[in-house]
Amino acid sequence: MEARAPQALIRIYTHPACLSHDTGPGHAERAERLVAVLEALRAAFPQLQPEVAPRASRGQLLRVHAPRLLDEVLESRPSTRIALDPDTVLSPDSAEAALRAAGAAVAAVDAVLGGEAMRAFCAVRPPGHHATADTAMGFCLFNNVAVAAAHALAKHGLARVAIADFDVHHGNGTQAIFEHDPRALFLSSHQWPLYPGTGSAEERGVGNIHNAPLPAGAGSAPFRAAWRERLLPELERFRPQLVFVSAGFDGHRRDPLAALQLVADDYAWLTGELVAIARRHAQDRIVSMLEGGYDLEALRECSVAHVGALMATG
Ligand SMILES: [Zn+2]
C-alpha cells in the first residue's frame, strides 16, 4: 500500500511569469510588489517551498468569463504594451501571467479539496477582483478568485462557497459574476466612495452579497466592527464549505492609492476569524488570493501577518 503524504498545513502557489506582466514605468501594480511578498514569506517561513502554478485551462476560465475577454487577453499577444483602459495594461507576457494567476487559484482549490493541503495562499499578479465576466479593468485581467470559486462549485460539486474580500477597493467583478448565484456568498469591506464606485450596502444580489463601505480615514476599530458585527455573522450563517479570501493589503495606512488606516495586525485578526469559521464549517479549508497592496513595506508586513494567521492550528 502506498503511503499517503501528510497533509500540508498551507501551500503557497506562484509562478515566475507573474513577474513578467509589465505594466510600464510608474505603474502602481508592478512586479516589485510580488517580489516583496515572496521575499517576505521566504524570510518569515523558510520551511514553505512555493508550488509552481499551472496554467488555467480555457474551460476553467469560460466558467466565469466571456469568450471575447479570453480572446482579448490571450490572443492579442501585443509586441509592446497596450492599454485596455487607463489603469489596465496588456504587455507581451501578460497572457502567460494571467493564465498562471488563475491557474494558481484552480490548483489551490484542487489541493485543498483533494486533502493535500489544509489552506493555500496564491502569491500572484495580475490581481483579479475587478475583472467582470467580459471586461478587464482595475489592473485585473481574469478574475482569479471567481475562476477558483466556480471550479469548486462545478468540478468538486460544492454547494456553498464564500468569498471574503478585504481589499480596500470593492470587488465589483466578483460581485457581478456571482450576484445571481445563491451558492456563492460575497462579503466585502472597502473604502467608499472610491474606485470602482460600486459596493454600497444596498447592493444585495439574491441576498448573497454583503457590502460594508468604510469612509476615508477609517482605521482598525470601524474595520473590525464591520467584520465582527455585519460580515462575519453572515459568513457563519451561510456555513461555507470552502472559504476564499481576496487578500488585498491596500487598506494599510501606508498605501498610496487609498486612505484607510489599517495596520498589519488587522489583517492577522481578520484572517484568524476566517480560520475559525472555516474550522467550524469548512473542514479548515481556505484559499486566499493576493489582490492589491501598493506600498512594498506594508505588503511585506501584511502578507506575513496574513499567511502566519493562515498557519494557525488550534
Ligand atoms: Zn485594491
Image: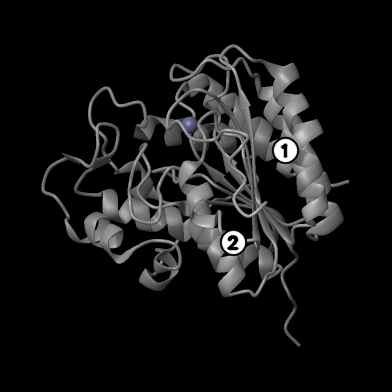
Residue, x 75% and y 65% (percent of image)? 6
Residue 264 vs residue 177: left or right?
Answer: right
- Mark 2–mark 1 Cα distance, whole angstroms, equals 25 Å
Along the line of sight, which residue is nearer the eye, 125 or 73? 73
- The disc placed on residue 160 is none
Residue, x 80% and y 57% (percent of image)? 239
Quadrant of the image occupied by residue 180: bottom right
Residue 25 vs residue 57: left or right?
Answer: left
Earlier-in-chain disc, 2 versus 1: 2
Residue 134 vs residue 108: left or right?
Answer: left
Q: Residue furthest top?
A: 217
- The disc placed on residue 271 is 1
**Quadrant of the snapshot with the N terminus:** bottom right
Q: Is residue 53 visible?
A: no
Disc 1: CA contacts within 10 A as few (<14), some (14-19) or many (>=20): many
Q: Secondary structure at mark 2?
A: loop
Q: Nearer the viewer, mark 2 or mark 1?
A: 2
Q: Position of residue 256 (x, y in %)?
A: 44, 16
Q: Secondary structure at mark 1?
A: helix
Q: Position of residue 47 (x, y in %)?
A: 65, 45
Q: Is residue 232 visible?
A: yes
In the rendered structure, which amino acid carries the disc numbered 1? Thr
Quadrant of the image occupied by residue 272: top right
Residue topped by disc 2: 181
In the rendered structure, which amino acid carries the disc numbered 2? Asp
Along the line of sight, which residue is nearer the eye, 25 or 159? 159
> How many marks do you count on the picture?
2
Residue 15 vs residue 170: left or right?
Answer: left
Contact? badges 2 and 1 (CB < 8 Å): no
